[in-house]
Amino acid sequence: MFFLGGSVVLMGIITAEAFYPAGYSTANSQISDLGSTVPPASLIYQPSATIFNGTMLAAGFMVLMATWYLHQFFSKWLVSVPLTLFGLGLVGIGLFPGNRVPYHGLSAMLAFLSGGVSAIAAAKITSAPFRYFGLMFGSIALAAWFIAVLSPRLLFPLIGDGGTERWVAYPIMLWLIGFSGYLMNSVESTS
């Protein structure tokens, strides 16, 4: 479910971008613009909005389901709690598009922060070398988020608002896909 969730997010974003009308820019447009732009002049383009929002909902539920099973196996709250919050954040992004202020922003913040923390916390149940990739991807996501919030002038002029947001979101998705491969290999090795 982690593998499918991470893959669905990446492919859903790519597909929603492909159907979005001209003018969408990965540098200047936020990922969530695919579901709806923020007020006051909120724009919703179909089928991009349905694809993006459905993708986030599906991925969020997959992460929640996978986290439940992960907790049954490892019983590590330090890993399960941030992963649960990450799944809830994804569900919130799908339920509350960008025009649903403040719920969308709160959901995105929950997903970004808990996703980065999840990658770092998973070091408790992973071994080297994958443990270091989790620490690296989680740190990149959290550092990009904090830079975007505390000092946006550092990254925004270089890669834009959308590029900065992708430096937060994509490391989390890449880690999630890698984490699922790690877990599948671990289960296979112990059989």
Image: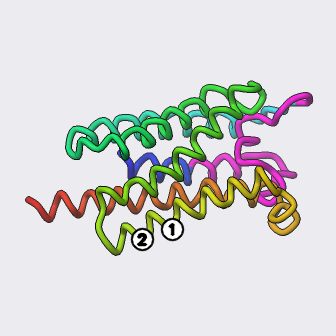
Left/right placement of residue 74 relative to residue 49 reads: left
| Residue at disc 1, secondary structure | helix
| Residue at disc 2, secondary structure | helix
Residue 142 locus on image (x, y percent)? 61, 56
Return the mark for residue 136: 1
Left/right placement of residue 159 relative to residue 145 reads: right
Residue positioned 33% across, 40% down in the render: 77
Residue positioned 51% across, 68% down in the render: 136
Q: Quadrant of residue 104?
A: top right
Which class describes the residues within 10 Å of circle 1: few (<14), some (14-19), or many (20+)? some
CA separation in Å, label 2 and label 1: 6 Å
Looking at the picture, does residue 121 appear above or below residue 84? below
Left/right placement of residue 112 relative to residue 126 reads: right
Return the mark for residue 89: none
Task: Give the amino acid type for the residue marked by disc 1 in the picture.
Answer: Met
Is residue 30 part of the magenta span, yes or no? Answer: yes
Residue 2 locus on image (x, y percent)? 38, 48
Toward the viewer: 17 or 58?
A: 58
Reading the image, the residue beneath label 2 is 132
Q: Quadrant of the C terminus?
A: bottom left
Residue 10 locus on image (x, y percent)? 56, 54
Looking at the picture, does residue 51 appear above or below residue 173? above
Q: Quadrant of the N terminus?
A: top left
Task: Give the amino acid type for the residue marked by disc 2 in the picture.
Answer: Tyr
In the rendered image, the residue lying farthest to the bottom is: 129
Is residue 25 part of the magenta span, yes or no? Answer: yes
Residue 126 locus on image (x, y percent)? 30, 62
**Magenta region, residue range:** 12-41
Q: Quadrant of residue 55?
A: top right
Toward the viewer: 127 or 4?
A: 127
Dots 2, 1 in contact, CB < 8 A:
yes
